[in-house]
Image (spheres, rainbow, N blue to C red):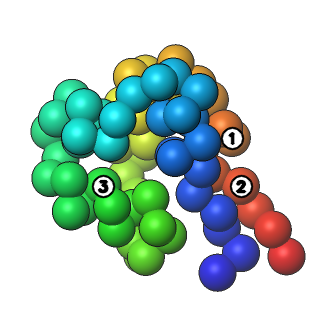
Amino acid sequence: MPIIVNIDVMLAKRKMQSKELSSRLGMTPANLSILKTGKAKGIRFETLAKICEILECEPGDILEFKK
């Protein structure tokens, strides 16, 4: 898939664990894992906005397009 999800990169930069992010998002760790590995078919803008708010970043820091 040409869309790369960089949540792990941002988590490392913010020194935050996936467990904390999933808790603050109100998402199960399993669903966050599906999103992080790029296996999700889509993401709601609401969820993306909340991730950006928590990680203090822009959507482009989380999602990347590669041919």
* Residue bearing mark 2: 64
| Sequence-wise first label, 1 or 3 | 3
Q: As displayed, is residue 55 above or below residue 63? A: above
Kind of residue indicated by mark 2:
Glu
On the picture, is 63 further left or further right than 52?
right
Q: Residue at x 52, y 47 (%)?
A: 8
Q: Do the residues bearing badges 3 and 2 touch, measured as CB atoms within 8 Å?
A: no
Cα distance in 3D space between marks 1 and 2: 6 Å
* Residue bearing mark 3: 32
Q: Do the residues bearing badges 1 and 2 touch, measured as CB atoms within 8 Å?
A: yes
On the picture, is 31 further left or further right than 17?
left
Residues 46 and 62: in front is 62
Kind of residue indicated by mark 1:
Gly
Residues 9 and 4: in front is 9
Q: Residue at x 85, y 76 (%)?
A: 67
Q: Residue at x 34, y 35 (%)?
A: 17
**Which tag is nearer the camera, tag 3 or tag 2?**
3
Q: SS at mark 3?
A: helix
Name the image quarter holding the N terminus. Answer: bottom right
Dot 1 crowding, Cα within 10 Å, few <14, some 14–19, many 20+: few
Kind of residue indicated by mark 3:
Leu
Dot 2 crowding, Cα within 10 Å, few <14, some 14–19, many 20+: few
Task: Locate residue 38, reporting x and y percent.
Answer: 50, 70
The disc label shown at residue 60, or none: 1
